[in-house]
Image: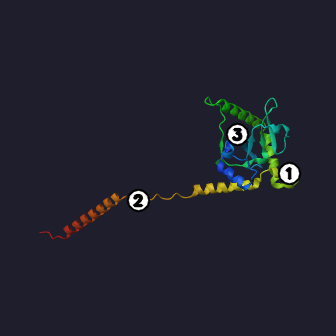
């Protein structure tokens, strides 16, 4: 059986905004905050049914002081240098309608800055794929704790998004999307122009005239 690989995705901005209205712990993808290109790692399947993406964050000085936890994972390179992190507490439910794969393939037209960023993303993604099982286990365990037994770790639960609330937002969006595609198309209305109306009226009048002339000939007695 072929093992599914993780990819980096960008999420639909309006969808993320709808999620943020339901839960302010959702990480921003706002252009005003220069977060519109925020990458998400996915797709992680939790509880054998729910599809989730995890926000990926660039390396920050504070990460060196943080410990790996159920809701947080450091991403390391081959030299054990921190090159990023996964914020599992901010993972969000997704479907194919709200995601698109982020193209991180090198391109000869890339600027030096773009090349360096793509190299970083590729290294981060490689680490995620090498650790996909542990990421999935963490995500599932965190999901169960937050949705089923939040009282076991209230501090951890407070750091996490309300996964059930976010799933309700996704379900509503998918239902709306389905209804839009199921609506029967309206027949296109056709309107005659003024010139066309005159042509039709003239043709009808000519037809009536020809019909009347034919009837007169039939009534005329033969000599």
Cα separation between marks 1 and 2: 66 Å
Closer mark to the observer between disc 1 and disc 2: 1
Q: Tag 2 or tag 1, which sits nearer the N-term? A: 1
Query: Badge 2: how crowded within 10 Å, few (<14), some, or many (20+)?
Result: few
Q: Which mark is residue 7?
A: 3
**Residue drawn at 81 percent across, 50 percent down:** 159
Residue 215 on image: x %, y %: 23, 68
Q: Identify the image quadrant of the N terminus.
A: top right
Residue 82 on image: x %, y %: 80, 34
Q: Secondary structure at mark 3?
A: strand
Residue 28 on image: x %, y %: 71, 47
Residue identified by numbered label 2: 191
> In the image as oriented, which residue stretches furthest toward the right?
152
Q: Identify the image quadrant of the C terminus.
A: bottom left
Query: Badge 3: how crowded within 10 Å, few (<14), some, or many (20+)?
Result: many
Q: Is residue 81 above or below residue 32?
A: above
User: From this viewpoint, is residue 149 visible?
Assistant: no
Q: Secondary structure at mark 2?
A: loop
> In the image as oriented, which residue stretches furthest toward the front?
32
Q: Which mark is residue 194?
A: none
Depth check: give the residue in front, 191 or 67: 67
Q: Tag 2 or tag 3, which sits nearer the N-term? A: 3
Instruction: Name which quarter of the figure residue 194 lies in.
Output: bottom left
**Residue drawn at 82 percent across, 48 percent down:** 142
**Residue drawn at 24 percent across, 64 percent down:** 210
Residue identified by numbered label 1: 155
**Residue drawn at 81 percent across, 43 percent down:** 72
Instruction: Name which quarter of the figure residue 3 lies in.
Output: top right
**In the rendered view, does 196 fall on the left or right side of 77?**
left
Cα separation between marks 3 and 2: 51 Å
Q: Is residue 204 above or below residue 10?
A: below
């Amino acid at each position: 059986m072929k093992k599914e690989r993780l990819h980096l995705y960008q999420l639909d901005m309006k969808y993320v905004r709808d999620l943020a209205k339901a839960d302010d712990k959702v990480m921003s993808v706002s252009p005003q905050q220069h977060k519109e290109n925020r990458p998400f790692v996915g797709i992680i399947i939790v509880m054998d049914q729910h599809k989730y993406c995890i926000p990926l964050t660039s390396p920050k000085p504070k990460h060196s002081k943080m410990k790996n936890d159920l809701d947080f994972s450091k991403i390391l390179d081959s030299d054990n240098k921190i090159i990023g992190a996964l914020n599992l507490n901010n993972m969000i439910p997704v479907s194919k309608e709200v995601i698109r794969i982020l193209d991180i393939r090198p391109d000869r037209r890339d600027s030096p800055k773009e090349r360096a960023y793509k190299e970083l993303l590729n290294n981060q993604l490689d680490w995620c794929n090498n650790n996909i099982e542990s990421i999935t286990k963490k995500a599932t365990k965190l999901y169960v704790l937050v949705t089923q037994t939040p009282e076991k770790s209230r501090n951890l639960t407070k750091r996490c998004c309300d996964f059930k609330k976010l799933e309700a937002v996704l379900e509503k969006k998918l239902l709306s999307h389905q209804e839009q595609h199921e609506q029967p198309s309206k027949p296109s209305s056709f309107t005659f122009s003024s010139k066309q109306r005159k042509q039709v009226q003239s043709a009808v009048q000519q037809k009536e005239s020809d019909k009347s002339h034919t009837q007169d000939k039939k009534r005329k007695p033969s000599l």
